Image: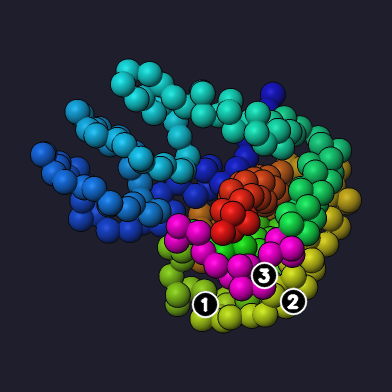
Amino acid sequence: MEAQFGPHRFYAGEGGGSAEFRGARFDVADLRGARFTDCDLTGVTIRDGWLVDVSISGYLSNVTVNGVDVGDFVTAELDRLHPERVQLRKIQTADDFRAMWDTIERLWAQATERAGRLPARALTQQVDDEWSFAQTLRHLVFITDAWASRTVLDSELPYHPIGLPQSWYPAADAAALGIDLAAEPGYDDILAARADRMAVIRRIVAELSDDSLGRLCRRSPAPGYPDGGATVADCIGVVMEEEIEHYRFAMRDLSVLEAR
């Protein structure tokens, strides 16, 4: 049986957002150049549309293009390119978690070394309005604080001030956690915070047992997140899925930066 954890279980509809266009209908509309970021497009129907030079990224399920469900194809291709996704889905035991973290540490060590060969300014450059490499590392600091230190370790306020929450996260909630969304930390400071948080996960997985995976964590990860119901396996699984998905995004954008 595959492990049942991951951000989509906990994050569905998390951003709320404006309901202004819910149920909207666009007929013979020119949407060229439109951009949808962090939008819930569940149930959207496009008929007789022109999809040319279109880029889509996100969680796909039951996505049909010209009568063909493309979800399985996309999943299979992503799994081929990133076999760590398959490894994550197959986790069942504490040893599996430890092996998964070994893989994540290896992948990010390679990514950080690769990024380090770029000019310093490139590390804070955004590609197509996505997070820069430095911002990605800051986000993973926040994810560790939220889904490991606060939940698994039961820490009341573990948030690093340079951590970077999701783009939808309310600024007031971030400030209440001691996070400075306007911070522009140096890259060395980011690397230090990132290394510290990775060591936190290393310590957690080193002490995991099969029996402890099902323990319910007392604290919700952060304001605005669902209360309760997350097990140790759920929480560490969220951290690991975030790690491998953001690694994938980082590799995509590093290739663009290198080409520049």
Furthest toward the left, the residue is 28
Discs 2/3, front: 3
Q: Most extreme residue toward the front, as rendered?
A: 260
| Residue 97 seen by the camera | no
Nearest to the eye among marks 1 and 3: give it. Answer: 3
- Report the amino acid beneath label 1: Leu
What colour scheme does the image use?
rainbow
Q: Which residue is mark 2?
A: 188
The residue depicted at 44 percent of the width and 24 percent of the height is 70
Residue pictured at 32% horizontal, 53% vertical: 35
Residue at position x 36%, y 24% in the image: 64
Q: Quadrant of residue 26?
A: top left
Disc with the residue nearer the chain's start (1 vs 3): 3
Q: Residues within 10 Å of mark 1 (few under 14, many from 20)?
A: some
The residue wearing badge 1 is 181
Label 1, secondary structure: give it.
loop
Say if the magenta span includes residue 125: yes
Instruction: Measure how far apart labels 2 and 1 are at the Cα level.
Output: 18 Å
66 lies above or below 96: above
**Residue 50 in the figure: left or right of residue 216:** left
* Highlighted range, magenta: 115-129
Q: Quadrant of the C terminus?
A: bottom right
Q: Which residue is mark 3?
A: 119
